[in-house]
Image (spheres, rainbow, N blue to C red):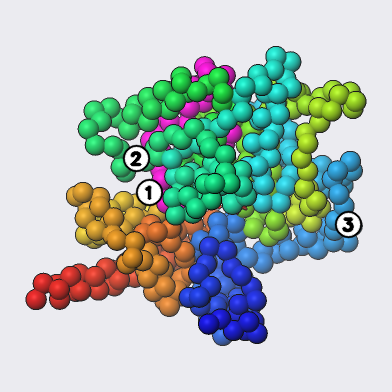
């Protein structure tokens, strides 16, 4: 029985079984470290859910907010703005790939995706040569784009999404373009195989499709599913050929995680609409953005009496405090050597854990890009068979890392490492050591149990 007076259950946590919840209260955070109310120090191995690219309490970010507080904390951006928000829109339009230029602000990644869905639908309804039948979306297998209803409709993770099917719209479902598990019997390369599947879906459905929605390069919440190199470029070309918009969701991959400011840059791709969130404010304040190319934006321009404006807007979209800290974060991310150092750190971390792949019988794959790392634990490396979900192995590995001073959160049996981009080599060493030891310890117990069962 839960005690209703217990303050530990007053806060209902997302994606958390509240009947089995160990409360962890963080009182202070500095750099890459969190300090609990009990004075225990924890390394923030997932950048507080993939957000705090510069770590915590960074002097430059703190002072950007303080400075903005002296001017204005909140105004609506429905019909007005402040200079800081205008400056951020201009900066994003300069820094995002190609001719992406028009920035629509919201408060979280799910909302950035919702805005992109409605924007692309409304575009086809009212552009000069309207295509009103384009009302559906193609989403990849195991997709995750957030938790609002439209974003969940795109979602393809059974465990998170299937329950809600009766209240969702149905997308055209693409493959899970995973380099680690290319379907048996395919004689094509992974790139050819997935490109053919997506091409076939576009061939069959392009007339009803408003857009393809995808995370470029790495599907984070799906378990760091890493696409074959070149797939993003192929999908861009297919979208052009079949006249379907491309929406790239860089809520997880954006702001330096993959070693470039945006993952799309790796394959010189400009999506029609780009969704940003998480690292936009360096993880300080809730802010997200949906950035559109001119041909999308122009379809919404008309005399006020024509009712062609974008019928969407969020109370806190473009909030000045969030804009101020986002500008300061972007300033640091775009310093000449910053991304080079991120690339070096990504390589360093991978080198430190690479021996797990050769030595450890239950480490099936180490994947992701740069400072986005997934370590998949499997029961059998040859067949790539997963452990039974009842074992909750990923969870027990992460519980052990927490006991050893490293806060990480798994996705099933994929151990996720997304440290702040400013983590030092010494901190990455410690992260790698604790994670490797925890995997060894938790899987050794499994071997012991299996052996016991034999006797
Ligand atoms: C790729 C992607 N899109 C959208 C979202 C949703 O963002 P938020 O939780 O800020 O709504 C997430 C969150 O993890 C994400 O990884």
Q: Which mark is residue 72?
A: 3
Left or right, 424 with respect to 51, comes to: left
Left or right, 242 with respect to 324, comes to: left
Depth order, front residue of 168/188 = 168
Q: Residue at 43%, 61% (x, y): give it.
A: 410
Q: Inspect the magenta stretch and tell me whether residue 236 lies in it.
A: yes
Is residue 278 visible to the viewer in this orientation of the structure? yes
Q: Secondary structure at mark 2?
A: loop
Question: Do tag 2 and tag 1 residues touch (Cβ < 8 Å)?
Answer: yes
Residues shaded magenta: 221-248
Residue extending furthest top?
Answer: 129
Question: Do tag 1 and tag 3 residues touch (Cβ < 8 Å)?
Answer: no
Q: Residue at 33%, 65% (x, y): give it.
A: 390
Q: Which mark is residue 367?
A: 1
Camera-near label (3 vs 2) is: 2
Which tag, 1 or 3, sits closer to the chain's start? 3
Q: Residue at 64%, 58% (x, y): give it.
A: 283
């Amino acid at each position: 029985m839960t005690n209703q007076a217990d303050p530990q259950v007053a806060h209902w946590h997302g994606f958390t079984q509240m009947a089995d919840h160990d409360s962890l209260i963080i009182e202070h955070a500095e750099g890459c470290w969190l300090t609990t109310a009990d004075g225990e120090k924890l390394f923030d191995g997932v950048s507080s859910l993939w957000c705090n690219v510069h770590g915590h309490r960074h002097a430059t970010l703190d002072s950007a907010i303080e400075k903005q507080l002296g001017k204005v904390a909140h105004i609506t951006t429905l019909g007005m703005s402040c200079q800081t928000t205008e400056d951020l829109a201009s900066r994003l339009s300069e820094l995002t790939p190609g001719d992406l230029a028009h920035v629509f602000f919201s408060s979280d990644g799910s909302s950035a995706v919702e805005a992109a869905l409605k924007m692309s639908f409304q575009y086809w309804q009212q552009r000069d040569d309207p295509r009103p039948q384009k009302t559906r979306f193609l989403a990849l297998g195991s997709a995750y784009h957030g938790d609002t209803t439209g974003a969940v409709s795109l979602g393809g993770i059974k465990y998170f999404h299937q329950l809600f099917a009766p209240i969702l719209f149905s997308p055209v479902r693409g493959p899970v373009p995973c380099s680690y598990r290319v379907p048996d019997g395919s004689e094509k390369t992974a790139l050819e195989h997935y490109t053919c599947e997506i091409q076939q879906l576009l061939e069959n459905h392009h007339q009803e499709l408003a857009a393809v929605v995808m995370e470029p390069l790495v599907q984070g919440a799906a378990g760091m599913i890493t696409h074959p190199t070149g797939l993003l470029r192929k999908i861009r070309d297919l979208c052009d050929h079949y006249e379907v918009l491309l929406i790239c969701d860089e809520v997880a991959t954006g702001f330096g995680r993959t070693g470039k400011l945006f993952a799309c840059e790796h394959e010189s791709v400009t999506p029609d609409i780009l969704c940003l969130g998480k690292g936009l404010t360096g993880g300080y304040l809730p802010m997200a953005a949906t950035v559109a190319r001119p041909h999308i934006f122009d379809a919404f321009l008309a005399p006020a009496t024509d009712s062609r404006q974008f019928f969407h807007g969020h109370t806190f979209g473009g909030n000045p405090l969030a804009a101020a800290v986002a500008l300061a974060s972007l300033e640091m991310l775009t310093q000449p050597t910053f991304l080079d150092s991120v690339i070096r750190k990504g390589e360093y971390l991978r080198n430190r854990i690479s021996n797990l792949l050769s030595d450890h019988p239950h480490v099936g794959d180490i994947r992701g890009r740069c400072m986005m790392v997934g370590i998949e634990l499997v029961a059998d490396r040859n067949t790539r068979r997963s452990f039974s979900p009842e074992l909750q192995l990923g969870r027990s590995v992460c519980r052990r890392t927490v006991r050893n001073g490293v806060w990480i959160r798994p996705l099933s049996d994929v151990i996720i490492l997304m440290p702040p981009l400013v983590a030092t080599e010494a901190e990455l060493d410690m992260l790698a050591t604790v994670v490797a030891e925890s995997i060894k310890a938790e899987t050794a117990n499994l071997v012991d149990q299996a052996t016991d069962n034999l006797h």
